[in-house]
Structure formats: C-alpha cells, structure tokens
Image (spheres, grey):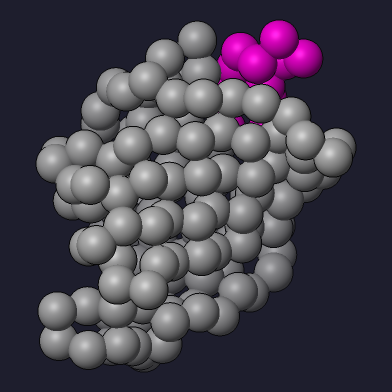
Amino acid sequence: MLKIIGKQFAGDNPEEQMEFITEGKLFERNGSTYLIYDESDFSGFPGCKTSLKLKDDTVRMKRLGKDVGYGLEIEFKKGQRFFTKYETPYGVIDMEVLTNSVENNLSPEGRGNIDIDYHVSLGGMAEGRNELKIEVS
C-alpha cells in the first residue's frame, strides 16, 4: 500500500496539498528498485500509470497515459537540473526541474518512504517548489 502526498508551496507555506492511498507493485531488477502505481482522479492524472526507478541517490519518474500526451519523464538527483517537455491542453511547454533533496528510506523488505523536494519551472512562466512524499507499507 502506498500513501502519496504532494505539496505545492508559496514561499515556505504549503499552498496546495494532494493526498491519496493506492496499491502499488514493488520489485527489483538489475540493481534498481521499481515502484509502479496507478494514478487516481484525485491526483489529476486519472488513467495514468506512474513508475519510479530508484537507484543510488536518483529517482526517475515516468508517467504514461492519455492525460499526459506522449508521457512525462523526470529525473530527481540532488543539486541537478533536469529538462523535459510537458504537454498541456494548450500545447507543449519546456519544463525544468531542480532537485533540492532526494531521500530513499526503503528497507530491503520494501517498507519505508521516499521524499523528494524540488523546484519546477514551466516555460519560465510558472515557478514553484514542490514536495513528493511516498510512504510504502
């Protein structure tokens, strides 16, 4: 079972918070841990599947489904910038992610949490800080 909490910040104060609980699959392959789950209506990506690839100090997120167009892929690694394209109902825009911190506290049994703190810029028009917390039980 996964408890997923997403927060968007305005300054130091959470502006928006999304939380949902879902089932997921956890497995290891070639030295990486994978966590796969279905998004909900509440997350804003109904019908999408999200996979997280955890290896060392890096988390790579892929989201596939009709509501993300050709798909979304983001890599989170502390202190690094990741550039990608984000498809919106109004067209494709450039997206830049700067990862502030990544914590992978999953036990060998697959229990624990993953915490990601990052800044995102959408085409230089919208910027903000976000947190993603995933509790695995």
Question: Viewed as shown, does residue 67 lie left or right of 84?
Answer: left
Query: As displayed, is residue 130 above or below residue 39?
Result: below
Q: Quadrant of residue 19?
A: top left
Question: Viewed as shown, does residue 131 lie left or right of 79?
Answer: left
Query: As displayed, is residue 114 above or below residue 135?
Result: below
Q: Quadrant of residue 75?
A: bottom right
Q: Quadrant of residue 102?
A: top right
Point out the stretch of residues depicted in magenta: 104-114
At x 51%, y 18%, the residue is 136
The N terminus appears in which quarter of the rendering? top left
Q: Position of residue 36 (x, y in %)?
A: 49, 35
Query: As displayed, is residue 25 above or below residue 59?
Result: above
Q: Does the rendering let one see residue 4?
A: yes
Q: Position of residue 67 (x, y in %)?
A: 22, 62
In the image, 10 versus 41, the foreground residue is 41
Q: Position of residue 2 (x, y in %)?
A: 41, 21
